[in-house]
Image (cartoon, rainbow, N blue to C red):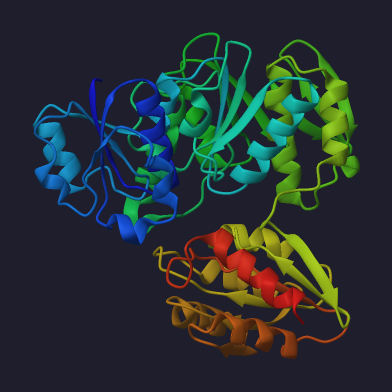
Amino acid sequence: MQRVLVWGMAKSGIAAAKLLCQKGLYVRINDLKTRESLKPDIDALDSLKLDDRLGEDVLTLLDDVDTLVISPGIPADHKAANLARQKGIEVISEIELAWRFSKGFLVGVTGTNGKTTTTTLIGEIFRAAGRDTKVVGNIGEPYSAHAGETTDESVTVCELSSFQLETISSFRPDISLILNLTEDHLNRHKTIENYAHIKERVFMNQQAGDALVLNYDDPITRDMAHRAKCDVYWFSRSEEVEKGAFVRDGMVMWNDGNTVSPILPAKDIRIPGKHNLENALAAAAAAMIAGIPAETVVRTLRTFSGVEHRIETVCTKDGITYINDSKGTNPDSTIKAVETMTAPTVIILGGSVKNSDYAPMAKVIVNSKVKRAVLIGDTAQAIEKALREAGFTDIANEGYDFEAAVRRARDMASEGWNVLLSPACASFDMFRDFEHRGEEFKRITLGF
């Protein structure tokens, strides 16, 4: 890797370009957008020596490079990526690039739901144990932004999306976790089987001495175990596993394969909900495998309050509680948020298309605390159809006016109710990303 083209100048592309320049390599940058439209973020590269080809056709920029680093938003089978491979150019993700320049211990976390919470929680446990810890990846902080800072004593905890895993080659975590698998991103991956296969790439390079943590309660992840070449551990809410973390009579237990030890009562875990019990079990398993003292794990599980944009209570105004679950970007994630509601709730649903099936979510909503729904965005009609077919009829549609949707939800609620933003969809029809959507929700509700 001597001459590198970084294609896509979002956060990860900018971080990759900076890392490569720091390492003294030839770096060419490209994006369909011009420099002017990428400001102010692109200004971070102003002082670096690189070949700026912003706004040019990437197909014309491949002849004299040997590595192409692609943005997660660019499919692995894009025609430019395929042409690069035909020319003998290596095509990799920013995650793969960062790993090559990283030192120390790596924990990789993937799955459909719970990645951000589990990644953050694992990072908090390692920090509480006094370890130099970087929390990076799909969580919002590019791996490349910190890879150059790592030492042999560092711990990196990396959240991994399927988009990032598509183009790894030698990437190898010391511990990997796959939390669960439900339909998501089928507009890109086409089938659940393809999606699962891409998630499995997180452990494809792991060997003896490495560890893989899987959800025993999920039949798709349970089936992955026989394809692993490393040690396999489990977490389970419902079964006592031979190796891993589980619940017995309300107590979180740890089985290292020889000895079963109590960790803490499940009720002491601060983050609420059955899904967060699973996230806590997964995080505890990773920490115990890594040799973190049990008392450190317990202390962190008792104090960790969750992450921004995931079932985050924003405020209570006029007796109505506003809850930001903008990170609910697929139906299964929204189901988990709905199941945590203990008061009558108005839900805001809808966003950009992922080819998801909304019928299972609609059936859960009908039998939940959710009493009314406000719909937005590209998927509003599809969600409304699923809700009505399930027998849920108290629905308003505010199209692409998000502020009007939040205000309508407020007006549909009463004192003692919740207003829950949990869209079950991506955000790109109306926002930069789910963080932007969540920040707007908070801005609007805090202004009531």
Image quadrant of residue 373?
A: bottom right
**Which residue is farthest front?**
47
Q: Is residue 297 visible?
A: yes
Q: Position of residue 70 (x, y in %)?
A: 30, 40
Towards the viewer: 306 or 196: 306
Place of residue 95 in the rendered image (x, y in percent of width and height, measured from the top left): 42, 32
Which is more toward the observer, 385 or 319? 319
Q: Is residue 153 above or below residue 120?
A: above
Q: Quarter of the image for the N terminus: give it.
A: top left
Q: Is residue 260 left or right of residue 358?
A: right
Q: Horizontal placement of 166 versus 387: left or right?
A: left
Residue 105 in the image: above or below residue 274: above
Q: Nearer the viewer, residue 308 or 16?
A: 16
Residue located 73% across and 72% down the image:
368
145 relative position to 53: left or right? right
Image quarter hosting the C terminus: bottom right
